[in-house]
Image (cartoon, grey):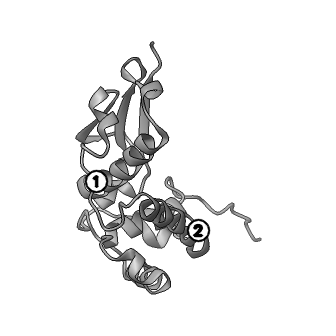
Amino acid sequence: MTENKKKEKTFNRQPERFQWKEGMDEEFIFPEELQMIQDLRLHFGDRTKGLSDKLILYFLLSRREEMEPTKEVLNNYLNLVEEHGWAGKRLTLEDAHILRHGHIRFHAGLYDKHDRPITYIFMENNKAKESTIKDSLAFMVYETQFTCENVPLRYLRNGGVQVVNMKN
């Protein structure tokens, strides 16, 4: 008698071979992931200069470690930073000044029960009408860089949670 079991999915939908396990370093990158990072660096050449392995892996994780979709999203990111003169630059709060409105708060070490980092968004402090598209893009690039620098890879593997207070 054969039993047709539905293949169980991992919580974060990443392949089982890329699951962080107790006892591993929180910043552990699997050898196959390192190879994919190198392949992406070869594909994009000098355009990835200045990007950390962890930042490139962040894009791989966002596309469940599938190369073609990762190439597309990473290419879009690289085009964005090149178009605005941010290539190879670590953006600061001066660049992403809309964060000074206080509508987004990140608390280091705050994770939900599924080990996902939590970000709080307070819409009453949002001054989007006073911001340009470039301001919003600068925030997005800053947040991506900040997250990769400050959240251990163990948690980035699981995605993230945004808690939004819609009070105006």
Residue 77: x %, y % from top left: 48, 62
Amino acid at circle 1: Leu
Q: In which quarter of the image is the N terminus?
A: bottom right
How much space separates mark 2 and mark 1, taking CA atoms? 23 Å
Q: Is residue 102 left or right of residue 4?
A: left
Measuring 27% from the left and 31% from the top, which residue is drawn there?
A: 100
Badge 2 local density, few (<14 within 10 Å), some, or many (20+)? few
Residue 32: x %, y % from top left: 43, 82
In the image shown, does 155 or 138 lie closer to the viewer?
Answer: 138
Residue 147 vertical placement versus 109 (above, below): below
User: What residue is disc 2 on?
Assistant: 72
In the image shown, does 6 or 123 lie closer to the viewer?
Answer: 123
Q: Quadrant of the C terminus?
A: top left
Amino acid at circle 2: Glu
User: What residue is disc 1 on?
Assistant: 91
Residue 6: x %, y % from top left: 69, 60
In the image shown, does 34 or 2 lie closer to the viewer?
Answer: 34
Residue 78: x %, y % from top left: 46, 66
